[in-house]
Amino acid sequence: MTNQSINMFSWTLHVLLVFLTFLVTSIIAAVLKGSRRKHGQKQPPGPPGFPVLGHLHLLGELPHRSLQTLATTYGPIMSLRFGDVPTIVLSSAAAAELLLKSHDTVFSNRPLLEALEYFSYGFKGLVFSEYGPYWRNMRKLCWLNLLSTSKVESFAPLRMKEVEKMVEEVEKAAMSGQIINLTEVVNDVLESMVYRMILGCDTGKNNGHDLKGIVQEVMHLSGAFNLTDYVPWLGKFDLQGMRRQFKKTSKALDEMLEEIIKEHEKVFSSKAKHDDFIDILLSLMYEHDEVDRTNIKAIAVDMIGASLETSAVIIVWALSELLRNPRIMKNLQHELDAVIGPGNLVEEKDVGKLNYLEMVIKETFRLHPTGSLLLRETLEDVEVGGYYVEKKTRIIVNMWALGRDPKAWPEKTEEFWPERFLETEVDFSGRESLMFMPFGTGRRGCPGMQLGLFTVKLVVAQLIRCFRWELPAGMAPENLDMKEKFGLSMPKAEPLLAVPSYRFRAKS
Ligand code: HEM
């Protein structure tokens, strides 16, 4: 035997051994878990699964669609197992009401995913920290100091300035009849707003650190499929090489945040102070023991992650639906012209008067929920709706399916029809009814809803008020590609391209 074939043989043996250990351990684990379950405890229905994989193979490229299809057979409360993780998928408003509303606390935990352990400094932020006193403190701190109504309003001039810059850029394209990539325009304005508000800097290179590139990598890795999250004991083999990437990216992220914090510290007591989230968190660190440097970094990452893609993605979907539905675009332009003075830019104080805009944004969230699968985990065993749900069961609320639940939305279910909200008195908060809850619900509901809505409405209103939009090369509205791709926030798969022309030159 040559050296090469000996190596080949030992490599094959190694892979076989790993696979066999994997198979045997998983079967033992499944048997032990089964035997722990008491007799007569009814599980929600679900399809038969494979050993080891469970139902992972059923997820497909667009899990929200695959799960919706499965729910037509197994019902709106469905039991699945992804690797080692028992999971319940909720696919209707009634199912979400039954579990989440009546047992808010029990369903208030989040799964501890490996990527987020790295990027949130061992779950020291808010979004993915475990339900309990630490999470409660962090939530209160963020709510009072960063996301309260008065704080959100204090950043309004910053948002307006960035929106004005965006309008100027689009005006240049309108002058030359250019096709523009609206997805890029929206991402750029959101990045500028979010980075300035949270970190006090823009999207370019910061002391040699590629802020935009690093954040994009963090978002990408946080949404990527990681086998370790489903079969934890396989983690030590790091078969997909994910841990290596988490370590590399979290190191780059940490170095960049350190420098940003140091810059803030240098000018903290001077007039050159930025007055952004880092400044606010630094003052809390100087005043209170409960905040340290790690918290500042973890919260900054959470706030960027929670606000950037969510808002940008929904704006692009809203603009796409408006381009595909000229009647609705016209209605919105009429409302904007009637409410806003001639030639003026829309300001945040106007947003509350724009009822049709509100309906357009609601309808966009119904059909294109950012975060198509909302993730929770049970804190303890619970019996609900005649079913037994174990502690540490992962709960997936299929928001995609909720928006298409024919019982909740019987009329024109698949159609973009904002007028349905004239009759349906639901707000964004998921407080009254879970048929519509784009910002989640209950204790873990989104604390950035107000900020998110202001931003989304302001950007959409400005782009529709100032410009007429056409699809490139005479494309018919109904031919616009509306496919989504799976990710943390379910963005449109293809960038949105369109040609702007002036409705009028706006002045602020
Ligand atoms: C259009 C924009 C946004 C959408 C659609 C959105 C949506 C959501 C959703 C669905 C959740 C999960 C809620 C649940 O489990 O019930 C969430 C959580 C969260 N969001 Fe937002 N969000 C947006 C903007 C923001 C902004 C601007 C911020 C802050 C700067 C923010 C901060 C958070 C935080 C901190 C959490 C975790 C709360 C917790 O676990 O206690 N979000 N968001």
Image: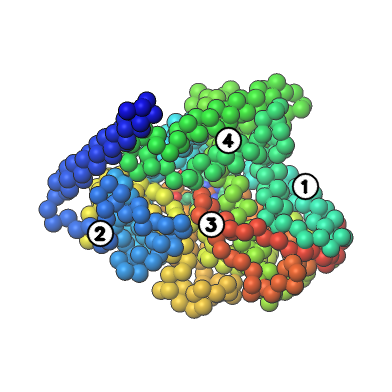
Q: Amino acid at mark 4?
A: Ala
Q: Amino acid at mark 1?
A: Lys
Per the model, the C-alpha gap separating discs 4 and 2 is: 42 Å
Mark number displayed over residue 161: 1
Residue at 49% x, 74% y: name it: 413
Q: Is residue 245 above or below residue 270?
A: below
Q: Amino acid at mark 3?
A: Lys
Q: Quadrant of the C terminus?
A: bottom right
Per the model, the C-alpha gap separating discs 2 and 3 is: 27 Å
Tell me the colour scheme of the image.
rainbow
Of all residues, the one furthest to the top in this rendering is 266
Q: Secondary structure at mark 1?
A: helix
Mark number displayed over residue 300: 4
Label 2 sits on residue: 48
Query: Closer to the camera: disc 4 or disc 2?
Result: 2
Mark number displayed over residue 485: 3
